[in-house]
């Protein structure tokens, strides 16, 4: 049921449930260690993440987006900080996230090639600048959020998604060595479901990590405390 609800949220097509023969399986196992069943089921919570994502009653949606963006940024920064000694110019000369190479797009829309640590540095600077801009994210009561808020906050989520994608694609072994993969899986799934619920990422971006998202949802533990009473037989 959880998978069906989440699948609907993500816009997945109905799956037959039969295992799909994949000739690329061996390559996948080598290139994508994060899909290994030993790791993919690791979490730090067994809560229903959809309940964490949902807008609480009485809360302004823009305030909810801003406070979550700030919390996600702090968690992504902590995880990236833990592996940053491995993310160096020689190790990561290009910014690879999932199977894609990203260039940095500056504030004037110009693209430039950069290494992963440079990309992470640019991303941290722009995210901090956006989230602390009083004109964009008003903190005083009853102040309206400007029209520029939504595109800016989407950019924040896109950058965080890229950073998590880089950690999965290039530093997953280090993450496992540090025993941080339950944190990474939980954070990724929370971020992705949040983005799906509030349309923070476009479908092309979300498709980049669809394989991982599906594997994580399928291996999610049954929530112990979903707040929903079990049906009587
Ligand atoms: Zn790196």
Image (cartoon, rainbow, N blue to C red):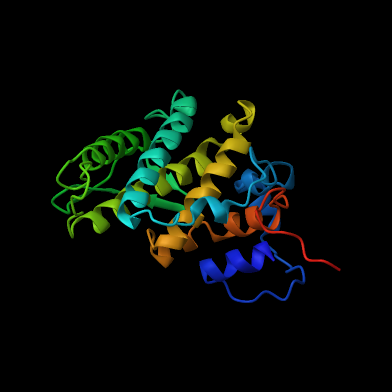
Query: Residue extending furthest top?
Result: 85
Residue 145 in the image, given as x and y percentages of width and height = 21, 54
Residue 14 in the image, given as x and y percentages of width and height = 64, 76
- Residue 217 sits in which quadrant? bottom right
Quarter of the picture holding the C terminus: bottom right
Residue sitting at x 22%, y 45%: 141
Residue sitting at x 52%, y 49%: 190
Please tell me which residue lies in front, 202 or 57: 57
Residue sitting at x 40%, y 28%: 88
Residue 221 in the image, given as x and y percentages of width and height = 72, 49
In the image, residue 168 sits, relative to residue 155, either above or below, namely: above
Please tell me which residue lies in front, 46 or 90: 46
Residue 118 visible? The answer is: yes
In the image, residue 3 sits, relative to residue 169, either above or below, namely: below
Residue 148 in the image, given as x and y percentages of width and height = 18, 57
Quarter of the picture holding the N terminus: bottom right
- Position of 163 with respect to 25 (left or right) is left
The number of numbered badges drawn on the structure is 0
Residue 102 visible? The answer is: no
Residue sitting at x 40%, y 45%: 68
- Position of 224 with respect to 147 (left or right) is right
In the image, residue 129 sits, relative to residue 59, either above or below, namely: above
């Amino acid at each position: 049921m959880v998978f069906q609800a989440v699948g609907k949220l993500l816009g997945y097509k109905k799956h037959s449930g039969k295992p799909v023969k994949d000739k690329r399986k061996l390559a996948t196992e080598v290139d994508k260690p994060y899909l290994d069943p030993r790791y993919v089921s690791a979490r730090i919570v067994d809560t229903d993440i959809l309940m964490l994502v949902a807008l609480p009653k009485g809360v302004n949606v823009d305030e909810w987006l801003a406070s979550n963006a700030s919390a996600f940024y702090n968690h992504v920064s902590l995880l990236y900080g833990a592996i940053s000694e491995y993310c160096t110019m020689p190790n990561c000369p290009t910014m690879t996230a999932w199977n894609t190479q990203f260039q940095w797009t500056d504030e004037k829309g110009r693209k430039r090639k950069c290494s992963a640590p440079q990309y992470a540095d640019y991303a941290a600077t722009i995210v901090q600048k956006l989230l602390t801009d009083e004109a964009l994210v008003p903190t005083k009561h009853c102040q309206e959020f400007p029209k520029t808020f939504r595109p800016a906050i989407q950019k924040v989520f896109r950058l965080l998604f890229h950073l998590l994608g880089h950690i999965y694609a290039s530093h997953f072994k280090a993450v496992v060595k540090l025993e941080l993969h339950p944190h990474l899986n939980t954070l990724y799934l929370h971020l992705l479901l949040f983005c799906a619920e509030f349309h923070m990422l476009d479908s092309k971006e979300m498709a980049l990590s669809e394989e991982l998202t599906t594997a994580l949802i399928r291996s999610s533990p049954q929530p112990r405390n979903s707040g929903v009473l079990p049906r009587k037989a």
